[in-house]
Amino acid sequence: MALALYAALAAAYFYWLDSVFERPGSYVGAGVVAFLALMGLGGLTNARTAWKTASLLAAAKQNRPLRDGKLVAVPGVIHASGKPLIAPFSGAECVLCEYDLASADRVSKSENQENTGSDFAGFLMTPCVIRSRHGDVRLLGFPLLEGFEEDHIFSYAAALRARDFLSVTPFEDRAGLKIASMFSVFGEVWSDDDGLVQKNLRLSKVDPKTLISPASKPDLERLSQWEAEHPEEVEDDEAEDERDLADATDDTTDDDELSDAEAETGLSVAIPKMTEKRVPPGADVCAIGLYQEKRRGLLPPRGSRHVNRLIRGSADEIQQQSRAAVRRNLIGGVVFLILLHAAVWGVMQLYLRSEEGQRRQEQSSAASNHVLHFGI
């Protein structure tokens, strides 16, 4: 839909700009202006989404009954139906988890330390319910997570857990050209109908067995034991690594810097970049999705554009944030589009008043008179 809208905008702007500018300038200008206009329309779309969220929450607070096949908001507290998940790197309990892992080699070669890409990624979900005013409502299909922070994990204990996880977990190969099939993966995850999701993906040719060398396992065990005995130093190291990652630039990364554990034990093991986005049991959330009465839960049909959303926070907090987002995105989108078109119109007027613009107008007028003369 976005591509179709972009194509329509580009065609419309080309028709407008081509009446003033020469080709291929009108082609390039139409493409750039259409992209900027799409960004402005994105702000209006975000405003509409926020308004819809606030409206659904207002209906939920009025305790309106859930209607089969309708988009509803279910605020409440999320709990696992059975045992909670154990996150693969942090070892923390959760009901949903998105994770990704990039090898130390990939990270060291990346110019942008924050966006290094991933070698492995996955979506994990255990059957869970949201305890709300309407009773327990099942969350079926992996949702889009909003308001849940991505946790960067740097410890050796986490690397040891990652090594064990990679060694026993079967991964779907989505490396190379197969990554184009990721759209189908998202479709499967979003529309999973039993609430149990185990989607583990390999996104590169890296062998999971070589990602963390087997020879380093004894060293990892010794380093993780040191971390268990020195929790304060581990917190300091992780906080420093978080700051380094946030401020990383090509000139500030230092591969020779040692952690406290490495300095004291004399050991050094390259650990991968590990991130998790987790939903803990007992968190205040609001789920938005299509309600299915027979399943007593939220589940989008395959191919539906209404994918489940899971927003962190209480109903009052999310409603307040949504109303603020409506105003912010609506005003921002409208102002941006006005300024964009004013700038384009201004550039067109300057060009028409220039020597080249007047020359083109004269040529166009002469060509029109020539056609009219022969037509008569």
Image (tube, helix red, strand yellow):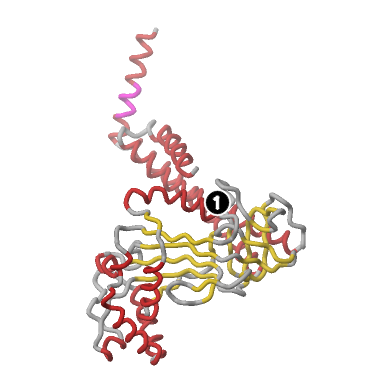
Residue at 60% of width from left, 65% of height from top? 127
> Magenta segment, principal secondary structure?
helix
Task: Report which quarter residue 289 is drawn in.
Answer: bottom right
Residue at 34% x, 62% y: name it.
Answer: 119
Vertical placement of residue 256 versus 229, above or below: above
Query: Would residue 362 be counted in the magenta stretch?
Result: yes
Q: Is residue 140 above or below residue 218?
A: above
Depth order, front residue of 330/303: 303
Q: Residue at x 34, y 36 (%)?
A: 27
Q: Where does residue 324 sit, x and y in percent of width and height?
A: 60, 63
Residue bearing the label numbered 1: 44
The magenta stretch spans which residues? 360-365
The residue positioned 51% from the left and 48% from the top of the image is: 41
| Any part of residue 44 in sight | yes
The quadrant of the picture occupied by the C terminus is top left
| Quadrant of residue 121 within the rendered picture | bottom left
Say how many tags the image has.
Answer: 1
Q: Residue 314 at what x, y percent from top left?
A: 64, 70
Check the image and name the residue furthest to the top.
376
Give how far across and how far down residue 3 sits, in percent.
45, 42
Choose top left, top right, bottom left or bottom right for residue 194. Answer: bottom right
For residue 66, side relative to residue 163 (left or right): right
Secondary structure, mark 1, is: helix
Verify whether residue 79 appears in magenta: no
Q: Which of 371/161 is in front?
A: 161
